[in-house]
Amino acid sequence: MSEQEHAAQLFEELHGRAPAGVWAAPGRVNLIGEHTDYNEGFVLPLAIRQRCVVAAAPATGAQSSVTSAQRPGETIRFTAADLTPGAVEGWAAYVAGVLWALREAGHDVGDVDLVVDSTVPLGASLSSSAAIECAVASAAAGLAGIDLDATQIALLAQRAENDYVGMPCGVMDQMASMHGKPGQLVFIDTRTLDVRNVPFDLSGSGLALLVIDTRAPHALVDGEYAARRRDCEEAARQLGVTALRDISGDELDDALAKLSDDTLRKRARHVVTEDDRVLTVVDILGSGADPREIGPLLTASHASMRDDFEITVPHVDVAVDAALAAGAVGARMTGGGFGGSIIALVAAQGPAGAEAVADAVRQAYSERGWTSPAPFVTQAEQGATRLT
Ligand code: GAF
């Protein structure tokens, strides 16, 4: 049974009628450009196969209802018109937050019955939250007949996460989930919100993109994320620029000399060099050169996150080192940090292929007595869409 059939069936069981429609939005991996989005810089994510599916219909009762296929038996209810931040907590806050954000933006969204079913793993830095937000926003807008483009939905989803859930994320994850295309990266200028798709089909070059969910325990993620964001804003303030995006690689040394302490210097160096790496990767892939050429840039991005932005943890560093030692062309942590997943650009097959690299990481974890990681090969997939 397909995902949409599964979500629709569960909807029918719960509500005694068919849903009016089924929508889906995927998670993402970020190829490169980490913690650059809230610095108004550049990011280069791709949508992945794992996604959140939402079966939806206008509510028949006086309230909205939300049920997750991952938590059957638990239905959360609220009234859309009465929503305020904090009123709904836990996983359902991502859903309530989207309805709240739509209404705050002046859209006449009424109460809805929703069944959500997600294959995006939680806590793996693969944007399970953006997937549910974008799927619910697409469904709610679709049901109400509100015509919003992909970027408008991404911004509303981000608002839900910032102001309802309380996580001060940038806009990358929601934009990736909305704008993903099969075989294409989503190159985003987060200042202008211009989006350009960059071809990313590795099959012709004998390569694969391996994702390894380290399953490392996450701790203090939101607090550390907010702290990094504050450091970057303080560095920009001291440099007299709107955002670190405004410092070019050529100006970096002069800029670093003006900052008040080493922590701010390290944070700024990561962001400025990471923006440059994104642009170089876009040039390489856009020119049709061998994708292997991006490998060293991925690995340099990881070193920058480890040493300057200080957002990696031992599980992540061990996975990257083991992947490189096993012959990966490049490897880096992906996402916000402090755990989650790594990506490795690897040969599709052979002694340094995806299987061998995944095995090497499993072996490194087993030697340390750590929970076995969860590897999978991914490619660029379709962004949010209406399924039925
Ligand atoms: C998280 C955030 F949600 C994104 O906006 C981005 O900042 C990312 O961390 C780091 O690049 O996924």
Image (tube, helix red, strand yellow):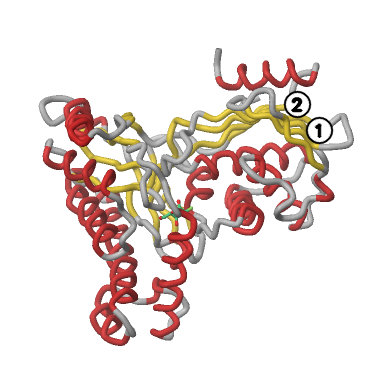
Residue farthest along the top direction in this orientation: 1
Q: What crowding class fits label 2: few (fewer than 14 Cα within 10 Å), some (14-19), or many (20 or more)?
A: some
Indicate which quadrant contains ligand 1: bottom left
Residue type marked 2: Ala
Is residue 88 visible to the viewer in this orientation of the structure?
Answer: yes
Q: Is residue 164 above or below residue 180?
A: below
- Work out how far the residue at label 1 is from the one at label 2, CA to CA, in angstroms: 8 Å
Q: Nearer the viewer, residue 320 or 284?
A: 320
User: Disc 1 vs disc 2: Cβ atoms closer than 8 Å?
Assistant: yes
Q: Which residue is mark 2?
A: 20
Image side of residue 386 versus residue 357, left or right:
right
Q: Which residue is mark 1?
A: 58
Residue 66 is drawn in which quadrant?
top right
Q: Earlier in the sequence, mark 1 or mark 2?
A: 2
Residue type marked 1: Pro
Q: Residue at x 32, y 40 (%)?
A: 200
Residue 139 is drawn in which quadrant?
top right
Q: Is residue 159 above or below residue 178?
A: below
Residue 110 placed where, x, y %?
83, 42
Looking at the rendering, in which quadrant would you find the C terminus?
top right
Number of the label disc, if any, that sits on residue 175 = none
Q: Residue at x 28, y 36 (%)?
A: 209
Image side of residue 360 versus residue 42, left or right:
left
Q: Residue at x 37, y 56 (%)?
A: 34
